[in-house]
Image (cartoon, coloured by chain):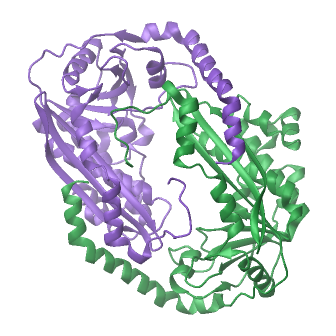
Chain colours: A purple, B green
Amino acid sequence: MIRKIYDMLIKNQREIKNQIYNTANYLKQEIQEKIKEYWNNYTPNTQLGQLEFVAVDGGSFSKAMRIGIIYAVGAESVIGDKGGVKPLGEDGRIGIFKPGNDAQERISLLMEALELLLALKDGKLGDYVLMDGSLNKKIGKKVDIQKFSKDELNLVENVDIDSIINLKDEEKMKDLLTLTNQLLISKIIEEYDGKVLWISKTSRSRDLFDTDYPDITVFELFTEETGFSNPIVKNIASEKVSNYDKVEILKNMEYSTFYARLDKGKRVIRIDITGRIDENIAKDIIDSISGISVKGYPFPLLKAHIDVRFSKSDREKIIRMIGSRLYKNIEWWPTQFD
Amino acid sequence: MIRKIYDMLIKNQREIKNQIYNTANYLKQEIQEKIKEYWNNYTPNTQLGQLEFVAVDGGSFSKAMRIGIIYAVGAESVIGDKGGVKPLGEDGRIGIFKPGNDAQERISLLMEALELLLALKDGKLGDYVLMDGSLNKKIGKKVDIQKFSKDELNLVENVDIDSIINLKDEEKMKDLLTLTNQLLISKIIEEYDGKVLWISKTSRSRDLFDTDYPDITVFELFTEETGFSNPIVKNIASEKVSNYDKVEILKNMEYSTFYARLDKGKRVIRIDITGRIDENIAKDIIDSISGISVKGYPFPLLKAHIDVRFSKSDREKIIRMIGSRLYKNIEWWPTQFD
């Protein structure tokens, strides 16, 4: 860091802090009334029966080498109740993609496919199925299915992930993965419907407050107690859903969204669930997941997340075993983050 | 990392390595003739007079907090010859942007503006001016200037960076920064023209080989000696240049591009220079910068890069001094990279 930045930091520290403080204060005055209208303080009642939760999460690692992008993708399902959490199933892929602008996107679609497959397989074992991330985001983009051959559509119908990720045409690979994920989401919703909770730790949605700040940020900044926001009903935008008869259920499908804090002073999460729910169902959900939450976040989801992530030593191992001399790094170039 | 990935790694290691090997071999056979046609082995002649090099680079750090995005941006110019390198000038900004999708882009435009300003100010001191990154990328996107008021255009004309980054309208902030950078590039080219070298360590350009791989990758994989590729002449796409009389010079402007390896077995860099150059000028350039290069990269650029980067302790310091309780992190959530 150059000297000038350090001087500026010292000199402007107070000013920047004031700027943050003033923004927060202004915001608070502007929207205090609205917060009262939307937010309900509520103390979760965790003295309920023994519910079982299936939770699914995925992780990925990729590294650009000269000759292509090495990737490793994993997903895990776990089952848990108040007594503890144990792994149920796992799936993964490791391989190499040719260099291309959308390699990262394909890796993330592949990870999502593995997550959805595990949820579909193991969801029946739980009273609730917890998925990481928002429903709307998982739907992805509309795909033009006209450009697929019958054989290619069969790959989707048979959820033949391995054939899809071996396709030479990368655009097609991406679109077939997207369509497969829409198909898997449709199946999960048909099978498990209102017992699937899509849980987001972050969200950019600004449905409630007319400010520059996401709803979740407003609630985090200006509420402190456990509670939840009034559920609102939204529709999956039909222009995101492919014209494919097997995903028809997704078109304009209604789902409900609400924000919740499960532990005082902790983060706010966003919960999506298909269909229309009212405050009482929101309370039921909060009561249920509070019983298996630690510091305001459902522990089974956290456990799955921890299991699937690639640690520094995992990543080094993968590079060591596959990368060797084709690794893109160079000895004289300092990395930004050391 | 889940067990399954580890098993796959062991099981598929040979297969993935073979896949890489086969791809490389196939590629080599396909394009060996073309490489011979484009690439010239050449031993740089560094026994030349004492040339002075001005080099400029910038660095940035940003951190999302609940209330906004803290950013710190720095840029430095250095001057060097065979005897050594010393700092010339530095500039920086530190502040906070409201959350918004293009905050990262604005931070990077701001960094570029500071770099270009230093180059314009200090360029006259060098026989060559070395800039980090490709010319075409620095030009950015076309901006519709119709939407600016006269006052706003004055901010650009006066290069009033501070007023621009204090604008409330973030779209306008972004576009005014883009236009300012186009103006600064025009001035640099008017003032210093053929002594400015735009040097890229990576490049996705595929002008020469009809493969999935960037030209720079092909040369790195299949040549080993010092040398360079035949310069090709390109034009700045006029649809990238704003309809602003002061950047008119950029429209369809010709520039030359070639690849070079300055040190045997080391990385290939890409060099852009305005105007048309032939092989002899390419050799002159290689002779000149070889004299101040270490392991195939111009040392003044590396020195500037090292000075401006934000180390782990710099980043922690910034967060500690400004961030405090509004910092977005959460104690129970494991980061992917620890």
The residue at the point 43 percent across, 33 percent down is: B329
The residue at the point 74 percent across, 76 percent down is: B289
Question: In this orientation, which residue lies closer to the viewer: A56 or A188?
Answer: A56
Classify residue A290 as left or right of residue A8: left
The residue at the point 55 percent across, 83 percent down is: B265
Question: In this orientation, which residue lies closer to the viewer: B110 or A100?
Answer: B110
Query: What is the x, y in percent for residue A94?
Result: 29, 64
Q: Judge whether residue B133 can be spotted in this image.
A: no
| Count of marks overlaid on the render | 0
Residue B300 in which image quadrant: bottom right
Residue B333 in which image quadrant: top left
Q: Judge whether residue B112 can be spotted in this image.
A: yes
Q: Is residue A284 above or below residue A125?
A: above
Question: In this orientation, which residue lies closer to the viewer: A174 or B262?
Answer: B262
Q: Is residue A248 above or below residue B15?
A: above
Query: What is the x, y in percent for residue B26?
Result: 42, 86
Q: Is residue A310 above or below residue A188?
A: below
Query: What is the x, y in percent for residue A231?
Result: 35, 18
Classify residue B124 as left or right of residue B32: right
